[in-house]
Amino acid sequence: MFKINEHYLKLPGSYLFSTIGKKVAAYTAANPDRSIIRLGIGDVTQPLAPAIIESLHSAVDEMAHRETFHGYAPDLGYEFLRSAMAKHDYQARGCDISADEVFISDGAKCDSGNIQEIFSTENRIAVCDPVYPVYVDTNVMAGRTGTYDPDRGIWSNVIYMPCTAETDFAPELPKERPDLIYLCFPNNPTGSTITKPRLQEWVDYANREGAVIIYDAAYEAYISEEDVPHTIYECEGARACAIELRSFSKNAGFTGVRLGAVIIPKELKCGDVTLHSLWARRHGTKYNGAPYIVQRAGEAVYSEAGKAQLAEQIAYYMNNARVILEGLNNAGYSVSGGINAPYIWLKTPKNMTSWEFFDYLLEKAGVVGTPGSGFGPSGEGYFRLTAFGSYENTVAAIERIRKI
Ligand SMILES: *Cc1c(COP(=O)(O)O)cnc(C)c1O
């Protein structure tokens, strides 16, 4: 008789967003006349920029002719996209990353979930708390996290780094020694970020302790402040300890198109073995690449027209963030984030739990957000709103919240 991967059975409850979906569906069924405004899930709403659409169209046309048809993409991605990323995302910022250290993929969720495969199951992971659930859950599936304590909402073999108002929503160096450290800045869900000197401390720590940092830079494009690093490779020594994850989802609206990348510098080694060689082996063995047409669309992100159009898109979302931030501030809420990220993190009023506030906001205002406790125990008492809605809906939602 076959056996299943029993680690899957350890995963608690259902995924955060499916619980939210069920609650909203139940509310809508009971109150069919109320309009609901969703400021919850982290999906973009603006259509793809014209430069990207144009590039997609012309790539589709290429596929129609024998001479320009493309079959399987190269394992690690097309040279044109790897070069564009190395040049624009790294070399232009003075970071020493070359095209052959870029691995093109179909998005950062898969990459952030899959990257743990190249490490021993004996490694201990450290995560921020609250955190993007993918990092923890995929390590649960791999059997790296020990046992779950349902009362405290924590795993016995995970090092949690609380990110609360006291730490300015950034993690402090852990007291126990981790092997893999997941960091994400600008952060989902708190919208917080980290200054370059503080990120440098993490790089120095990882190099000193022999740990690897897995740095999720999915929200890099939202950075508006000067002293916030756009990539971990701005820090000295990061080539020896950091893997960076990039996504085209939030900067260019590719959530339904799918494109991302992993950066693994060749200096990142365990003894003689480069992590680069392991990830290349993995790609070659069980990944057949992001589609040609999508990689061409990704290339357009770096064109002059693409850059200008995407800057406008991000400004649109960040104007929503400003509306939420100012509106809630004026209404007396304690809020953070929303300056370098499309997420606003607010303290629930009157000591409500995150789920109590979820129900309260849904009932009283018809506004859907995300309970902070869904991202980890230190998220309890917090709530996430996102700037990804339309301007009109965002303004309406904040009006409704102010009125209650
Ligand atoms: C949205 C998001 C991603 C991007 O995921 P894709 O698979 O590229 O769409 C990655 N990390 C975090 C923290 C995110 O919020």
Image (cartoon, helix red, strand yellow):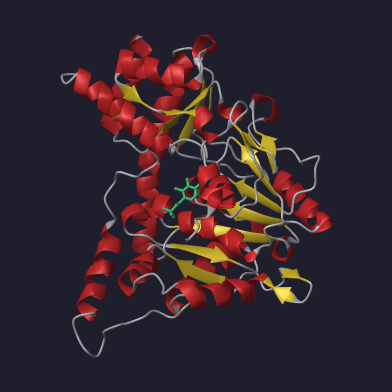
Closer to us: 297 or 51: 297
Q: Can residue 269 be seen in this view?
A: yes
Q: In which quarter of the image is residue 214?
A: bottom right
Residue lying furthest left: 33
Residue lying furthest front: 1
Residue in the picture at 34% in, 74% down: 292
Instruction: Describe residue 240's horizontal placement relative to residue 2 as left or right.
Output: right
Residue in the picture at 67% in, 58% down: 121
Q: How many labels does the image show?
A: 0
Q: Quadrant of the C terminus?
A: top left
Residue lying furthest right: 208
Residue in the picture at 20% in, 23% down: 29
Q: Quadrant of residue 90?
A: bottom right
Q: Is residue 132 visible?
A: no
Closer to us: 51 or 185: 185
Query: Measured along the vertical axis of the image, is residue 161 above or below residue 218?
Result: above
Residue in the picture at 75% in, 69% down: 270
Residue 385 is situated, as x and y percent measured from the top left of the image, at: 42, 30
Residue 33 is situated, as x and y percent measured from the top left of the image, at: 15, 19
Residue 126 is situated, as x and y percent measured from the top left of the image, at: 69, 45
Query: Measured along the vertical axis of the image, is residue 337 above or below residue 137?
Result: above
Query: Measured along the vertical axis of the image, is residue 359 above or below residue 321?
Result: above
Residue 166 is situated, as x and y percent measured from the top left of the image, at: 69, 25
Closer to us: 349 or 141: 141
Instruction: Describe residue 379's horizontal placement relative to residue 402 as left or right.
Output: right
